[in-house]
Image: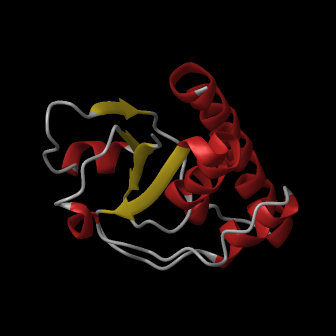
Amino acid sequence: MKKKILVLCTGNSCRSQIAHGYLEHFGKDKVEVFSAGIETHGVNPRAIATMRENGIDISHHTSNNVNEYNNEEFDYVITVCDNAKEHCPYFPAKVMMLHQNFPDPAKAKGTEDEITAEFRRVREMIRLYCQNFVTQHIA
């Protein structure tokens, strides 16, 4: 039976979308992954481009509000920013809640090259976290 995972962040535009892509990639047919935000900001085009560099297509993802999943039963809820953790709705006790705060690459400032570098840096942090999560909890 597939493990159901919800990845939650503030706007469901970058960090949760990147994690969603990696969890599906590493978890393959063992997971069913959803992502949502406390708000919805749309999937960030830079997040899509950054993931495409690693051969993962998240262009079909949508930005969803966490309230859309009120009636879903998850095995894991992973918050990827402190704001989401603080505003995370109640989930039944059987859910394993995990938290890892990642910097928001959408807030990066500077030249195009500097912003791209920040997206790549955060992407790699999330990739390692997701790879370790799947190894520890799914594989």
Quadrant position of residue 41: bottom left
55 relative to 37 in the view: left or right? right
75 relative to 113 in the view: left or right? left
Percent from the top left, x then y, of residue 130?
A: 61, 37
Q: Quadrant of the N terminus?
A: top left
What residue lies at 52% left-to-right and 45% top-to-bottom? 31
Percent from the top left, x then y, of residue 76?
A: 36, 37
Q: Quadrant of the C terminus?
A: top right
What residue lies at 67% left-to-right and 38% top-to-bottom? 125
Foreground: 59 or 103? Answer: 59
What residue lies at 73% left-to-right and 66% top-to-bottom? 110
Coloration mode:
secondary structure
Q: How many marks?
A: 0
Quadrant position of residue 68: bottom left
42 relative to 38 in the view: left or right? right
110 w.r.t. 85: above or below: below
